[in-house]
Image: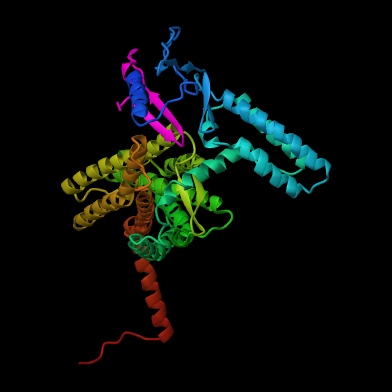
């Protein structure tokens, strides 16, 4: 068999699909002749009367007549459409014939629904009759053809549903909803060829253990650190400068995801089958993206603020202040909210064997739409901020090495002995950034290209899902370490902490009435 030809065998039907390029039909015709000869050698005969030929011509000028095909001296009939595995295929590759056939058959069954209504059967029985007799017709191979019909064809299908709804007197799912449910079910049959997640996977226990340790360690550290930062900036009369604005917003982004982390841990490990799981999956994805890309954007803004305070400490006073920082923060939050809207259409819950439910992404919608969103987030949401952070911190490191006594971030003088500490914090910030966010975005881009070239198969679906969930959890490392690197290590926080300790020590001395007296030698 040549590369341009494909054989499809189903029961007693055999289909030959051939591609004709540059008017070269010899390979296609030789394939059919070889099939006929093979049948003759094996005491089989092709029925030329029941054999049909359908030609789809993609040329702009297709007025030329195609030569007929002969099988055992009999001419094969050329048709404009035929039925293959329940699907009406036409030579113009439209679904008008398919939808009109389904509408006609469904309308014929509406007659029986009206007769049942006249004998006063209950709405429940009528609804069951509709699902079994009429809806089964409308949803026949719906995952194949529903994405391409015209608006008029979809309206004619929906008109059948509305008529049945009027007869029964109860709400019935629309055709769009039927397509969504069947599309989801068709996808479920694809990954379910592997073992159920985490509970039955022999190689998935290590993943569950690492995920559990990561969440248990990260949750208290991240919550306590970010809550301490928020209290420090809102309740302790912290001076509101540019750095304070960005650090507070960074803590808000981190704690938004950390508050949802216990529920995420429960659903990742137990995966219960409950109602409203789809809403949780959408909220989880929205909060996750707000945390990831909000943290990335505010980390980039913090690096810019420290760059201006270190490299341009005097000139930046004329064009960079707290109001500009607030405007940048507001614009960032608007961008985060708008960027999370696609998650409402790209995230959903799916049911798997053993009463298990998982959250899945990037299935519904056209592939170009999913690709655009994923690549835009990887480029604009990760790569661009990382390049800017690297450039800003590189310039800061050069200035700190050459002039260690120069003014540092937040317009505070940096002593020479603290230059090494600042450089270590800069390198640690970049390392945490890469460790937390680089693997996740590399996997997202890899999944897009794997799907583009057709490398996502039933054998690697479960492995890719585990890797995706693990790297998603790895992004929480940044939420836990951000308070340490950017807030708890700041001079303002350390000075305030030392003052609080001294105040507590003086209070203890007053309460015990102790006076420091030097004992005689």
521 sits left or right of 279 in the view = left
Which quarter of the image is occupied by the N terminus? top left
Find residue 114 and report its horizontal and vertical position in percent: 78, 37
Q: Residue furthest left?
A: 402
Q: What segment is highlighted magenta in the picture? A: 1-27
Find residue 487 and report its horizontal and vertical position in percent: 36, 57
Seen in the picture, residue 162 relative to 498 is either above or below; the reply is above
385 sits left or right of 166 in the view = left
Q: Residue at x 44, y 42 (%)?
A: 362
Q: Quadrant of residue 102?
A: top right
Instruction: Decide whether residue 187 is among the magenta residues.
Output: no
Residue 344 visible to the viewer: no
Q: Residue at x 38, y 77 (%)?
A: 506
Seen in the picture, residue 138 relative to 274 is either above or below; the reply is above
Instruction: Decide whether residue 15 is among the magenta residues.
Output: yes
Residue 446 vs residue 89, the one in the foreground = 89
Q: Residue at x 60, y 40 (%)?
A: 177
Residue 103 visible to the viewer: yes
Residue 506 vs residue 66, the one in the foreground = 66
């Amino acid at each position: 068999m040549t590369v341009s030809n494909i054989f499809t065998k189903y029961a007693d039907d055999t289909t030959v699909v051939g591609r004709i390029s540059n008017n070269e039909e010899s390979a296609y015709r030789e394939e059919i002749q070889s099939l006929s000869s093979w049948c003759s050698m094996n005491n089989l005969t092709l029925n030329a009367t029941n054999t049909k030929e359908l030609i789809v011509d993609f040329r702009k000028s297709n007025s030329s007549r195609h030569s007929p095909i002969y099988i055992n001296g009999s001419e094969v009939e050329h048709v404009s459409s035929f039925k293959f595995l329940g699907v009406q295929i036409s030579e113009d590759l439209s679904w008008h014939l398919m939808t009109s056939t389904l509408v006609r058959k469904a309308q014929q069954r509406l007659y029986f629904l009206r007769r049942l209504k006249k004998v006063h059967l209950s709405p429940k029985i009528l609804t069951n009759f509709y699902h079994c007799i009429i809806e089964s017709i409308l949803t026949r191979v719906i995952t194949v053809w529903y994405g391409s019909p015209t608006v008029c064809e979809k309206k004619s299908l929906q008109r059948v549903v509305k008529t049945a709804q009027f007869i029964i007197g109860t709400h019935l799912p629309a055709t769009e909803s039927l397509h969504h449910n069947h599309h989801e079910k068709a996808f479920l049959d694809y990954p379910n060829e592997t073992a159920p997640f985490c509970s039955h996977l022999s190689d998935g226990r290590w993943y569950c253990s690492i995920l559990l340790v990561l969440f248990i360690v990260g949750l208290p550290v991240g919550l306590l650190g970010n809550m301490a930062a928020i209290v420090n900036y809102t309740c302790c009369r912290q001076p509101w400068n540019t750095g304070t604005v960005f650090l507070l917003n960074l803590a808000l982004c981190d704690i938004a995801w950390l508050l949802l982390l216990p529920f995420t841990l429960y659903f990742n490990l137990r995966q219960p089958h409950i109602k409203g799981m789809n809403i949780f999956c959408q909220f989880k994805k929205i909060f996750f993206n707000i945390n990831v890309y909000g943290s990335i954007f505010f980390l980039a803004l913090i690096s810019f603020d420290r760059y201006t305070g270190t490299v341009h400490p005097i000139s930046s006073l004329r064009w960079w202040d707290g109001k500009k920082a607030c405007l940048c923060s507001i614009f960032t939050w608007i961008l985060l909210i708008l960027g999370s809207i696609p998650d409402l259409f790209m995230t959903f819950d799916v049911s798997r064997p053993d009463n298990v439910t998982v959250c899945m992404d990037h299935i519904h919608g056209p592939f170009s739409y999913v690709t655009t969103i994923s690549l835009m987030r990887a480029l604009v949401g990760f790569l661009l901020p990382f390049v800017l952070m690297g450039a800003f911190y590189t310039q800061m490191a050069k200035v700190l090495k050459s002039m260690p006594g120069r003014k540092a971030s937040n317009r505070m003088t940096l002593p020479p002995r603290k230059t090494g500490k600042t450089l270590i914090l800069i390198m640690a910030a970049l390392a945490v950034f890469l460790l937390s966010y680089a693997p996740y975005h590399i996997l997202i881009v890899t999944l897009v290209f794997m799907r583009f070239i057709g490398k996502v198969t039933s054998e690697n679906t479960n492995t890719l899902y585990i890797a995706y969930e693990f790297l998603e959890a790895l992004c929480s490392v940044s939420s836990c370490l951000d308070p340490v690197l950017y807030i708890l290590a700041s001079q303002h926080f350390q000075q305030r902490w030392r003052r609080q300790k001294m105040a507590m020590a003086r209070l203890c001395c007053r309460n015990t009435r102790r006076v420091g007296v030097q004992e005689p030698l």
